[in-house]
Protein backbone atom coordinates (compact mmCIF):
# COMPACT_ATOMS: atom_id res chain seq x y z
CA UNK A 1 0.00 0.00 0.00
CA UNK A 2 1.52 3.30 -1.08
CA UNK A 3 2.07 6.05 1.47
CA UNK A 4 2.40 9.78 0.85
CA UNK A 5 5.24 11.90 2.20
CA UNK A 6 4.27 15.05 4.13
CA UNK A 7 4.04 17.78 1.43
CA UNK A 8 5.39 20.54 3.72
CA UNK A 9 8.26 18.60 5.32
CA UNK A 10 9.26 17.32 1.87
CA UNK A 11 9.75 20.91 0.63
CA UNK A 12 11.42 22.49 3.68
CA UNK A 13 14.73 24.02 2.66
CA UNK A 14 13.74 23.93 -1.01
CA UNK A 15 10.75 26.25 -1.48
CA UNK A 16 9.50 26.48 2.14
CA UNK A 17 11.10 27.65 5.36
CA UNK A 18 10.92 26.40 8.95
CA UNK A 19 8.16 27.76 11.20
CA UNK A 20 10.49 27.67 14.22
CA UNK A 21 13.85 29.40 13.84
CA UNK A 22 16.28 28.93 16.72
CA UNK A 23 19.21 26.82 17.82
CA UNK A 24 19.53 24.91 21.09
CA UNK A 25 21.46 21.96 22.49
CA UNK A 26 20.43 19.14 24.83
CA UNK A 27 17.67 19.86 27.32
CA UNK A 28 17.23 23.40 26.01
CA UNK A 29 16.13 21.96 22.66
CA UNK A 30 13.39 19.90 24.32
CA UNK A 31 12.33 22.88 26.44
CA UNK A 32 12.07 25.22 23.44
CA UNK A 33 10.23 22.64 21.34
CA UNK A 34 7.57 22.01 23.99
CA UNK A 35 7.25 25.73 24.61
CA UNK A 36 6.70 26.38 20.88
CA UNK A 37 3.91 23.79 20.76
CA UNK A 38 2.18 25.26 23.83
CA UNK A 39 2.52 28.85 22.60
CA UNK A 40 1.10 28.03 19.16
CA UNK A 41 -1.86 26.26 20.76
CA UNK A 42 -2.38 29.18 23.17
CA UNK A 43 -2.35 31.76 20.36
CA UNK A 44 -4.79 29.73 18.22
CA UNK A 45 -7.20 29.39 21.16
CA UNK A 46 -6.76 33.03 22.18
CA UNK A 47 -7.70 34.26 18.69
CA UNK A 48 -10.18 31.54 17.79
CA UNK A 49 -12.14 32.67 14.74
CA UNK A 50 -9.49 35.17 13.63
CA UNK A 51 -8.39 32.93 10.73
CA UNK A 52 -4.81 32.36 11.92
CA UNK A 53 -3.17 29.96 9.48
CA UNK A 54 0.29 29.61 10.98
CA UNK A 55 2.54 31.05 13.67
CA UNK A 56 6.25 31.51 13.02
CA UNK A 57 8.49 31.64 16.10
CA UNK A 58 12.02 33.05 16.01
CA UNK A 59 14.29 33.19 19.05
CA UNK A 60 17.10 35.75 18.86
CA UNK A 61 19.07 36.18 22.08
CA UNK A 62 16.58 36.90 24.86
CA UNK A 63 13.78 37.94 22.49
CA UNK A 64 11.00 35.76 21.03
CA UNK A 65 9.60 37.10 17.77
CA UNK A 66 6.15 35.85 16.67
CA UNK A 67 4.84 36.30 13.13
CA UNK A 68 1.11 35.61 12.81
CA UNK A 69 -0.31 34.87 9.35
CA UNK A 70 -4.02 35.64 9.46
CA UNK A 71 -6.93 36.28 7.12
CA UNK A 72 -8.45 38.82 9.54
CA UNK A 73 -5.68 41.12 10.77
CA UNK A 74 -8.19 43.64 12.15
CA UNK A 75 -9.44 41.10 14.70
CA UNK A 76 -5.88 40.29 15.79
CA UNK A 77 -4.67 43.89 16.04
CA UNK A 78 -7.82 45.34 17.60
CA UNK A 79 -8.78 49.00 17.90
CA UNK A 80 -5.61 51.11 17.72
CA UNK A 81 -3.55 47.99 18.44
CA UNK A 82 -5.09 47.45 21.89
CA UNK A 83 -5.69 43.71 21.41
CA UNK A 84 -2.18 43.11 20.10
CA UNK A 85 -0.62 44.96 23.05
CA UNK A 86 -2.75 42.99 25.53
CA UNK A 87 -1.74 39.63 24.07
CA UNK A 88 1.90 40.72 23.92
CA UNK A 89 1.84 41.40 27.68
CA UNK A 90 0.17 38.02 28.31
CA UNK A 91 2.81 36.21 26.26
CA UNK A 92 5.62 37.98 28.12
CA UNK A 93 4.07 36.86 31.41
CA UNK A 94 3.82 33.27 30.12
CA UNK A 95 7.36 33.04 28.77
CA UNK A 96 9.18 35.41 31.11
CA UNK A 97 10.94 36.77 28.02
CA UNK A 98 10.64 39.88 25.91
CA UNK A 99 8.17 39.29 23.07
CA UNK A 100 7.71 40.92 19.66
CA UNK A 101 4.53 40.40 17.60
CA UNK A 102 4.24 40.86 13.84
CA UNK A 103 1.02 40.39 11.88
CA UNK A 104 0.95 39.38 8.20
CA UNK A 105 -2.27 39.35 6.19
CA UNK A 106 -3.21 36.35 4.05
CA UNK A 107 -4.41 37.97 0.85
CA UNK A 108 -6.20 34.91 -0.54
CA UNK A 109 -7.52 32.67 2.28
CA UNK A 110 -9.32 30.35 -0.16
CA UNK A 111 -5.97 28.88 -1.28
CA UNK A 112 -4.64 28.37 2.26
CA UNK A 113 -4.97 24.69 3.21
CA UNK A 114 -5.21 25.35 6.96
CA UNK A 115 -8.05 27.85 6.61
CA UNK A 116 -9.90 25.71 4.05
CA UNK A 117 -9.67 22.62 6.30
CA UNK A 118 -10.79 24.62 9.34
CA UNK A 119 -13.77 25.92 7.35
CA UNK A 120 -14.81 22.38 6.42
CA UNK A 121 -14.37 21.19 10.02
CA UNK A 122 -16.50 24.08 11.26
CA UNK A 123 -19.23 23.18 8.74
CA UNK A 124 -19.18 19.53 9.86
CA UNK A 125 -19.57 20.60 13.49
CA UNK A 126 -22.63 22.63 12.43
CA UNK A 127 -24.04 19.39 10.93
CA UNK A 128 -23.66 20.48 7.30
CA UNK A 129 -23.47 17.58 4.84
CA UNK A 130 -19.82 16.56 4.45
CA UNK A 131 -20.16 16.22 0.65
CA UNK A 132 -21.65 19.69 0.37
CA UNK A 133 -18.94 21.20 2.59
CA UNK A 134 -16.15 19.54 0.60
CA UNK A 135 -17.52 20.47 -2.82
CA UNK A 136 -18.20 24.08 -1.85
CA UNK A 137 -14.64 24.45 -0.52
CA UNK A 138 -13.22 22.96 -3.72
CA UNK A 139 -15.28 25.32 -5.87
CA UNK A 140 -14.11 28.39 -3.91
CA UNK A 141 -10.46 27.32 -4.07
CA UNK A 142 -10.47 26.72 -7.82
CA UNK A 143 -12.34 29.98 -8.38
CA UNK A 144 -9.75 31.84 -6.26
CA UNK A 145 -6.91 30.72 -8.53
CA UNK A 146 -5.87 27.34 -7.12
CA UNK A 147 -4.39 24.95 -9.70
CA UNK A 148 -5.53 21.82 -7.89
CA UNK A 149 -7.10 20.60 -4.66
CA UNK A 150 -7.83 17.37 -2.83
CA UNK A 151 -10.00 17.10 0.29
CA UNK A 152 -10.34 13.95 2.38
CA UNK A 153 -12.68 13.26 5.30
CA UNK A 154 -12.36 10.22 7.58
CA UNK A 155 -14.66 9.05 10.36
CA UNK A 156 -18.36 8.37 10.95
CA UNK A 157 -19.45 10.46 7.99
CA UNK A 158 -23.11 11.44 8.12
CA UNK A 159 -23.49 9.58 11.43
CA UNK A 160 -22.85 6.18 9.83
CA UNK A 161 -22.27 3.20 12.12
CA UNK A 162 -19.04 2.23 10.35
CA UNK A 163 -16.28 4.78 9.83
CA UNK A 164 -15.02 5.30 6.29
CA UNK A 165 -12.93 7.66 4.19
CA UNK A 166 -14.14 9.76 1.27
CA UNK A 167 -12.26 12.27 -0.84
CA UNK A 168 -12.76 14.58 -3.80
CA UNK A 169 -10.16 16.20 -6.01
CA UNK A 170 -10.04 18.72 -8.85
CA UNK A 171 -7.21 20.00 -11.03
CA UNK A 172 -3.56 18.94 -10.76
CA UNK A 173 -1.74 17.88 -7.59
CA UNK A 174 1.98 17.11 -8.27
CA UNK A 175 2.98 15.84 -4.81
CA UNK A 176 6.46 14.67 -5.86
CA UNK A 177 7.51 17.83 -7.73
CA UNK A 178 9.69 19.90 -5.40
CA UNK A 179 9.11 23.19 -7.21
CA UNK A 180 5.32 22.75 -6.91
CA UNK A 181 3.93 24.87 -4.07
CA UNK A 182 1.59 22.31 -2.48
CA UNK A 183 0.05 23.43 0.81
CA UNK A 184 -1.26 20.80 3.25
CA UNK A 185 -3.20 20.73 6.49
CA UNK A 186 -4.95 18.24 8.76
CA UNK A 187 -7.75 19.36 11.11
CA UNK A 188 -10.05 17.48 13.50
CA UNK A 189 -13.78 18.18 13.59
CA UNK A 190 -15.53 17.14 16.83
CA UNK A 191 -19.13 16.12 16.02
CA UNK A 192 -21.87 14.45 18.05
CA UNK A 193 -20.97 11.14 16.33
CA UNK A 194 -17.25 11.38 17.12
CA UNK A 195 -14.14 12.95 15.64
CA UNK A 196 -13.79 13.41 11.87
CA UNK A 197 -10.39 14.03 10.32
CA UNK A 198 -10.21 16.59 7.51
CA UNK A 199 -7.14 16.67 5.25
CA UNK A 200 -6.59 19.25 2.54
CA UNK A 201 -3.98 19.52 -0.22
CA UNK A 202 -3.87 22.66 -2.41
CA UNK A 203 -1.58 23.16 -5.40
CA UNK A 204 -1.07 26.92 -5.62
CA UNK A 205 1.79 27.64 -8.01
CA UNK A 206 5.31 26.72 -9.06
CA UNK A 207 8.31 28.35 -7.40
CA UNK A 208 11.96 28.61 -8.35
CA UNK A 209 14.16 26.11 -6.52
CA UNK A 210 16.67 27.48 -3.98
CA UNK A 211 19.63 25.77 -5.62
CA UNK A 212 23.03 26.43 -4.08
CA UNK A 213 26.21 26.97 -6.09
CA UNK A 214 27.57 23.69 -7.52
CA UNK A 215 30.32 22.04 -5.48
CA UNK A 216 33.77 21.95 -7.14
CA UNK A 217 34.68 18.55 -8.55
CA UNK A 218 38.21 17.34 -7.84
CA UNK A 219 40.08 15.78 -10.69
CA UNK A 220 40.89 12.12 -10.11
CA UNK A 221 43.36 11.82 -12.99
CA UNK A 222 46.46 12.02 -10.78
CA UNK A 223 45.08 10.31 -7.69
CA UNK A 224 47.16 7.16 -8.14
CA UNK A 225 50.85 7.66 -8.80
CA UNK A 226 53.05 4.92 -10.11
CA UNK A 227 50.12 2.81 -11.21
CA UNK A 228 49.59 1.08 -14.48
CA UNK A 229 49.14 3.33 -17.49
Image: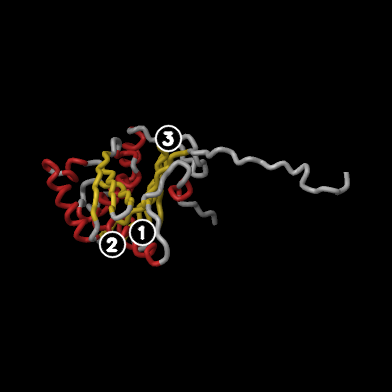
Between 133 and 112, the residue placed more toward the observer is 112
At a point 42% along the width and 43% down the height, the residue shown is: 16
Q: Secondary structure at mark 1?
A: strand
- Total label count? 3
**Which residue was labeled with disc 1?**
155
On the rendered image, what quadrant is the N terminus found in? bottom right
The label nearer to you, 1 versus 3, is 3
Disc sitting over residue 193 in the figure? 2
Q: Position of residue 54 (x, y in %)?
A: 31, 48
Q: Is residue 213 above or below residue 9?
A: above
In whole angstroms, how far apart are the C-alphas of marks 2 and 1? 9 Å
**Earlier along the polypeptide chain: callout 1 or callout 3?**
1
The image quarter in which residue 138 lies: top left
Q: Secondary structure at mark 2?
A: loop
Q: Are the residues tagged 1 and 3 within 8 Å (C-beta)?
A: no
In whole angstroms, how far apart are the C-alphas of marks 1 and 3? 31 Å
Amino acid sequence: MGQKVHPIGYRIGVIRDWESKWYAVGKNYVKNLHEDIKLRSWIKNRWEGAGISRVEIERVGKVIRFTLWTARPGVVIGKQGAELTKVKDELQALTGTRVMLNVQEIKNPDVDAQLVAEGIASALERRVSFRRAMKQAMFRTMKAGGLGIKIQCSGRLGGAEIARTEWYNDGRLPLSTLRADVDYSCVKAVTMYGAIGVKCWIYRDEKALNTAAPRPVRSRANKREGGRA
